Amino acid sequence: MITPMVKATIMGPRRYFTGTLDLIHSIGTVHFDPFPTAGHRIDCLESSSRPREADDIRVQLADLLERVRRLRSSLPPPGTSPTAPAWLFDRNISSSDLKDCLQKADGQISPPFDELLTLRNELAMLSRYERVVAALYPLLQRATEVEKLELMGIILERKREGVIPILDKALERITDSRSVIFTGDMDRENIAAIVAYPPEYDRTVRTLLTRESITDIRLPETYSDKPLATTLRLIIHRRKELPGQISLAEERLSDLSSRWSGCLARIEEIIVERLDEIQTVSYGAQSRHTFFLRGWIPADKVDLLLNGIRSNYHEEITVEVAPAGLKEFSEVPVELRNRPFVRIFEPLIRLLALPRYGTLDPTPFMAFFFPLFFGFILGDIGYGLALLGLSSFLRYRFREIPLVASLASIFMLGGTSAIVFGALFGEFVGDLGEHWGLHPLLMDRSRLFMPLLFIAIGLGVAHILIGFCLSLLIGIRQRHGRHGASATANILALTGAILLVASAIGYVPEASTVGILLLILGLTTLLFTEGLMGPMEFLKTFGNILSYSRLMAIGMSSVVLAKVANMMGGTAGSIAVGVIIALIFHSLNFALGVFSPTIHSLRLHYVEFFSKFYQPGGRPYRPFRRHSTL
């Protein structure tokens, strides 16, 4: 649900402005907006902030915040819960004290972190040469037997292997038969080679190789001034000792993390709070003797604010509370507050913009219909159990990450719904349960195509009608007569159309007259309230309803694929091969059975259902409160 908000205007002697702001910061319930100074009845009213001074402080704090976050990102997570020293909880701590503390932390953290980065980069660089070194080093043992010759490493594509004899003859001619080429396999595509030749022919040999489009191996710059044999040995040695040095650097940073993580986290809290305070000060207004603040507060937290101010300032600070007017709904911040079962679906709503204040939160409806649609499509006990187990593991494994935990909880509900519908349809890993005596409690959907289609369309009709009813409720709440009349007309026209269809197929033969009257009344009302577009938009409703047939179609395809997997596994001729084939196909079907119901259930909500009543554009409720990462 959308939390009811009230507007709070806070006034008091100017000398209490800073103290009142600090108290409200501690209470943490007020979402501040700029106080309207233009055209106010108090002529000398002006903004509370001093722009130039505030900007200078904001820039300094932003620089400190960037530094502390850089230092925190340099440290690994601490092994135990971080704690901060007591002096950092002093409200009067100065920015210079924070700067000195960060300077000290930077001096201890940055050198080992820079060293670790350097070591990791060096390891990554040498790792790129690993295949080259592995191919050239065995050749090096043979090449070093030839004394007083220059060594050059080259790599040739295997398709150019025929160049080597030609190159060998050309080198012999240039060097008076004093050159040797040693070759070996590098991988499937390449051949490694070492060319040995007298040093005085270096320039001539390199010219020949360039003419043949053969380049020598470019080894790291650190080793560029050393002979090839020395370079290869140094790379191998360095490659072996780097992991140990990296481990030592990581251990030093772990020790520093235990020492500094709590301190840095607390400094970040202080800086963020002070930046919030600067922003909030700019929202206030002051006359010669009085300050003014205005904001929004949840209705059930008004007493918390009033009691806090009265206990500290008695009657010297005045708080005026008033409900939001209809014209102010676009300015009121939105806080979604739902029970835990419903709250896990809020991330799916936040994929869109928040609903506007004064409308409705669709989260409870998604919490009911999403698992219903998901289970209706998947509808298999075996797949439902697999999804329930997998999502339970993910929820436990990532319980510290709220978004992942919420999504895992949603899939747990989807798996449970799939188990229920699997029992109703009599499905366990396709028709495998049938061989074990499992029978459908409701219907075998693989054999009853039309009844399943009618149920899917019926769910669509109910879903769309609920959407129109919610639109009517929003119109009543907002006292918007035209909006309410349009929603009522859609309800009447859709009900009339349903009665006509039911009469035509013989379910309710006597309902045709009532259906025609309701349809005509609804379309006429739409024509008056929405113009020609009203009846045309209503025709789209039938397309919306037919979209729900996908609940049947996708579910049927899942059943068929599961049966095909069982059939192919049963005809494999070998139990082991049959099990492997069945597992492959069931794994594919399970993946599709999770992905498709998720996408299509969301689409039915976002496109078909929400389009009937959802009004996005709400501002998130961000109360002025203290932050805590410890």
Image: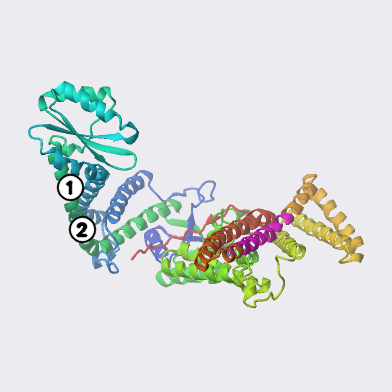
Q: Is residue 120 left or right of residue 21?
A: left
Outermost residue toward the bottom?
A: 437
Find residue 205 and report its image quarter: top left
Extent of the magenta region: 545-565
- Whole-angstrom CA distance, mark 2 to mark 1, is 18 Å
Between disc 2 and disc 1, the foreground one is: 1
Magenta stretch: helix, strand or loop mostly? helix
The vertical placement of 146 against 343, above or below, is: above
- Seen from the viewer's position, the closer of residues 183 and 268 is 183
Task: Left or right? Give the position of 375 relative to 492.
Answer: left
Image position, residue 542 (x, y; %): 76, 53
The answer to whether 252 appears left or right of 303 in the picture is left
Quarter holding the C terminus? bottom left
Residue 599 in the image: state x and y as whole percent.
Answer: 59, 56
Instruction: Name the one closer to the observer, 11 or 297.
Output: 297
Viewed as shown, does residue 186 lie left or right of 457? left
Q: Secondary structure at mark 1?
A: helix
What kind of residue is marked 1?
Ile
Q: Which residue is mark 1?
A: 236
Q: Quadrant of the N terminus?
A: bottom right
Label annotation for residue 318:
none
Residue 7 appears in view = no
Residue 555: say if magenta. yes
**Which three-letter amino acid code belongs to the residue tagged 2?**
Ser
The tally of labels here is 2
**Residue 353 in view in this figure:** yes
